[in-house]
Image: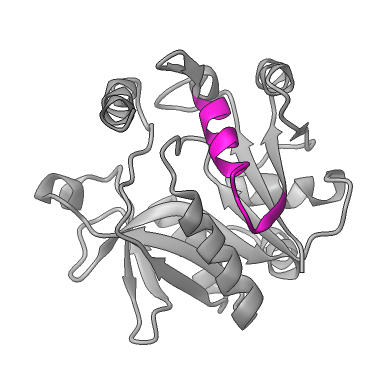
Amino acid sequence: MNAVIVIPARWASTRFPGKPLAMIAGVSLIQRVYERAARSARAGAVFVATDDDRIADHVASFGGRFVRPEGEFQSGTDRIAASLDLLGGEFDQVVNVQGDEPLIDIDSVDRIIDMLQSTGVDMATLATPIESEEERQSRDVVKVVTKLDGSALYFSRAPLAGARRHVGIYGYQTGVLRALAALPPSPLEREESLEQLRALQNGFTISVVQTTKAHLGVDRPEDVARVEYELAKHA
C-alpha cells in the first residue's frame, strides 16, 4: 500500500496572514514542515496544497512539490480531497500534516500510516498529554477524549475531563477522504470550528495514536519566538 503526505497551506490565515512564509530561525515555516514530512519512512510522496502563487513559488524554490486545487474550501480536509486527482499517482492513504507544525515528530506520522495500513481504520490522528492548566483552558488548543478502545469520542476547544491535546495530523483511507469531502459541514463541526467532527458525526471511526513527543505549533506571530527557542535547545 502507498501513502502520501499532503500539507495544506493557505495565505489568508485569520490570526496570522502569510503564515507559511514566516521565517523561523532563517527558514520558512512551510519549508520546515515540508522537510520534516520528507523524512517519513512510510510515505511515498510529499506535496503542499496551496491557494497562493507566493507559497507555490517558494515551495518550488526549495525543491518541494505542490498542487493548486481550484475552488473555495471550508477546511484543510476539503482542500486535500480536491488535490487527490492532481498528485500524479494513486495513493491508498493520505496524511494531512498541518502547515503550522514545524516541530512535528515524523515517527508519529509514520505510526499513523502504520495504523491505517495494518487495521484498515477509517482515520487516525495523534494526541499528546496536556502540560499545563493554561493549555487546558486555551481555545487555541484542541482537546480529544477517547473511548475505551482508543478511538476518538469527541474533540473540543473547551476544557474536557480526561482529555489530551490533539495534534492536528489526520490520516485517511483515500476512499474515506473522498466520502467526507462530499458531505456538508456537520452541525458540531460548525459549532466548534473543528473539521474532524464532520467525520465523527457521520459515523466514521478515528483511531487516536498516543505520543509523548513535544508538540508546538504556530498559531499566532508570537509563537515564532517559542518555536525558535525550542529549535535552539535541540540544535
Residue 37 on the magenta span: yes
Please provide percent x and percent y for residue 92: 76, 66
Q: Quadrant of the N terminus?
A: bottom right
Q: Quadrant of the C terminus?
A: top left
| Residue 75 at least partly seen | no
Instruction: Residue at 45% x, 51% y: name it.
Output: 168
Q: Is residue 202 left or right of residue 139?
A: right
Residue 23 on the magenta span: no
- How has the structure been colored for display? one colour
Please provide percent x and percent y for residue 147: 35, 82
- Look at the image and give the residue range highlighted in magenta: 29-44
Instruction: Residue at 50% x, 60% y: name it.
Output: 196
Question: Which of these two is toward me, 160 or 23?
Answer: 23
The correct choice, above or below, for 15 with respect to 111 in the image is above
Q: Is residue 167 left or right of residue 165?
A: right
The correct choice, above or below, for 234 with respect to 186 in the image is above
Please provide percent x and percent y for residue 58: 67, 17
